[in-house]
Image (cartoon, grey):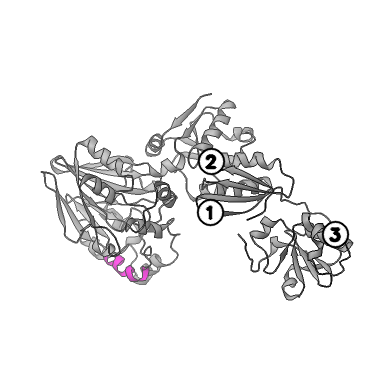
């Protein structure tokens, strides 16, 4: 039987289109339980490859013959071995090219909206890690917000669209993933902005991203307005684009809110977080569409694969925006927090420019799910 | 330097090869012998540990030096519960309060990854030739992982005229106190 090789992009399509897929994950059990490819209609079997070295006969009855079966491992090698064994046993299977490593790094660009005067807004969905990055294009120019570290994805996308990257923003100093902002700015000559309150320890030059900063993109004068909104970090800043879209960074998500503890200052920042969510955001128009920097589960994806919700709807539905009692709010965001993201302290150091790990080391640091939220 | 019975060079090999090669290599060892696997694939640590556990070998631990991971695995650790013949025994939680010598008869690699402070290491295979290192006047508490090897070692000591010998039960498997590492 033939073995086919699937790319992360093909698997991403299955997720977004809500198709069926059977995943034979041959990583060890801890790795699988910590983090796997999520899909609404996906089925799973987790058998470590090293339990299949003597043959795959014992798992054949558990593999369906009426739907696609894909073998997945950490980097590809083991999944190829198992796929070959299954093929010899007469099964038609695929394996994931590059394994979970490529899944973690794959970005699916999806258009969120057409803006005024021919502008466009794209969301880059990193399904394997739950990160969301953004690109605004207008009049031949582009701005990027919260870029992940795969800078060539953004620069190539800009080339395809025939736009020049002029502005690169990070809404805050990230702790769960390595920012690609500085690299993109260096490569394209764009201006790199960072909130100064998050940048007290950074060792590179940047342009301060301050409250009320207004940047125009392209000849059509697309407005990108900065809104100081501390809480996840002390410098966290949101953006209002074209008076229609609210990019919330790691402050507000679709089904959760930002956690204030990743820089070790939860008690200090919890008041800022409340102020941002319960006062500053309340003053904004309810019809703004919230575009966060993360999602936690694929249940937050819309039908087209984007992650976006009306602010007014979140005021009604998001638990974190509906905790009346201040003490209860404080307890919710400081106690019983989920585990902290993998290597988050090192990742902050990378984003400050203090350490410069190799490509492989960066991959290791980012392994696993993002954990920036509290529900 | 941790003493082993065999070394396997799996450096530069990507998953699944470190485990595949280890499986092949360990087939040539006898039960109880120790294999050192040198690898550079970071994932090999979790995989070898889980693999060893699933097939009944004992994963002892890993030492990192630069880019190289040195994994230590002892073949066939799932020792069956055998009848212990040596009559004089001492319970594990008593030995710290006694004044004799703790004699650890596990393989040196097992000893290296965790032993009771002050314990003397003589792997059971070397015991007969190293009897002169032991004091016949001193109480000796013989310990291993589960109590089987120490039972045999205690019998061997008694046969050679040692009179103050005790087998420690159970063994290091159940030890919750402080351990010392030499890696």
Q: Is residue A286 visible?
A: no
Mark drawn on residue A57: none
In the shown orientation, is residue A174 left or right of residue A116? right
Badge 2 element: loop
Badge 1 element: strand
Instruction: Please identify, in this view, whether the residue under mark 3 or under mark 2 is nearer the observer.
Output: 3
Q: Are marks 3 and 1 in contact (CB under 8 Å)?
A: no
In the shown orientation, is residue A355 left or right of residue B175? left
Nearer the observer, A151 or A288: A151
Mark 2 lies on residue? B15
Q: Please, is residue B161 above or below residue A104 in the view? A: below
Mark drawn on residue B156: 3
Query: Would you say residue A355 sits in the magenta stretch?
Result: no
Nearer the observer, A111 or A95: A95
> Where, by quadrant of the figure, is residue A105 drawn?
top left
Mark drawn on residue B65: 1
N-terminal label among 2 and 1: 2
């Amino acid at each position: 039987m033939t073995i086919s090789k699937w790319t992360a992009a093909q698997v991403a399509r299955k997720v977004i289109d809500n198709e069926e897929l059977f995943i034979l994950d041959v990583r060890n059990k801890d790795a699988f339980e910590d983090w796997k490819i999520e899909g609404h209609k996906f089925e799973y079997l987790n058998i470590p490859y090293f339990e299949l070295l003597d043959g795959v006969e014992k798992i054949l009855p558990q593999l369906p013959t009426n739907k696609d079966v894909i073998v997945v491992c950490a980097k590809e090698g083991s999944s190829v071995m198992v796929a070959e064994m299954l093929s010899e046993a007469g099964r038609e299977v695929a394996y994931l090219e590059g394994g979970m490593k490529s899944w973690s790094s794959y970005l699916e660009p999806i258009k969120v909206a057409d803006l005024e005067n021919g502008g466009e807004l794209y969301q880059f969905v990193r399904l394997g890690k739950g990160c969301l990055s953004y690109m605004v294009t207008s009049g031949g120019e582009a701005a990027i917000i919260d870029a992940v570290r795969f800078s060539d994805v953004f620069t190539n996308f800009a080339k395809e669209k025939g736009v020049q990257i002029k502005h690169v923003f990070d809404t805050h100093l990230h702790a769960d993933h390595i920012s690609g902002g500085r690299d993109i700015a260096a490569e394209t000559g764009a201006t790199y902005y960072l909130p100064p309150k998050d940048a007290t320890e950074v060792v590179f030059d940047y342009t301060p991203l301050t409250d009320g900063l207004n940047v125009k993109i392209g000849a059509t004068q697309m407005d990108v307005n900065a809104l100081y909104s501390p809480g996840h970090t002390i410098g966290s800043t949101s953006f209002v684009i074209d008076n229609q879209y609210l990019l919330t960074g790691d402050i507000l998500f679709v089904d959760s809110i930002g956690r204030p503890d990743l820089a070790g200052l939860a008690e200090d920042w919890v008041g800022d977080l409340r102020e941002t969510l319960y006062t500053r955001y309340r003053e904004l128009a309810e019809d703004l569409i919230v575009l966060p920097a993360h999602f936690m589960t694929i249940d937050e994806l819309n039908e087209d694969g984007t992650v976006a919700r009306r602010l007014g709807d979140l005021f009604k539905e998001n638990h974190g925006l509906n905790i009346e009692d201040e003490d209860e709010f404080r307890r919710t965001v400081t106690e019983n927090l989920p585990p902290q993201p993998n290597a988050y302290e090192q990742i902050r150091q990378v984003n400050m420019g203090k350490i410069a790990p190799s490509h492989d080391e960066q991959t290791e640091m980012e392994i696993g799910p993002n954990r920036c939220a509290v529900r | 330097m941790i003493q082993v019975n065999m070394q396997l060079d799996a450096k530069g090999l990507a998953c699944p090869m470190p485990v595949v090669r280890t499986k092949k290599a360990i087939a040539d060892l006898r039960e109880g012998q120790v294999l050192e696997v040198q690898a550079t694939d970071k994932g090999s640590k979790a995989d070898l540990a889980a693999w060893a556990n699933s097939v009944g070998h004992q994963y002892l631990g890993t030492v990192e030096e630069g880019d190289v991971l040195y994994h230590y695995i002892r073949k066939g650790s799932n020792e069956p519960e055998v009848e212990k013949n040596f009559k004089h025994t001492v319970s594990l939680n008593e030995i710290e309060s006694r004044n004799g010598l703790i004699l650890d008869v596990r393989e040196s690699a097992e000893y290296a990854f965790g032993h009771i402070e002050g314990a003397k290491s003589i792997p059971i295979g070397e015991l007969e030739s190293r009897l002169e290192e032991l004091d016949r006047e001193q109480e000796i508490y013989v310990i291993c992982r589960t109590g089987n090897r120490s039972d045999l070692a205690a019998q061997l000591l008694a046969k050679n005229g040692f009179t103050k010998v005790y087998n420690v039960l159970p063994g290091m498997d159940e030890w919750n106190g402080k351990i010392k590492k030499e890696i």
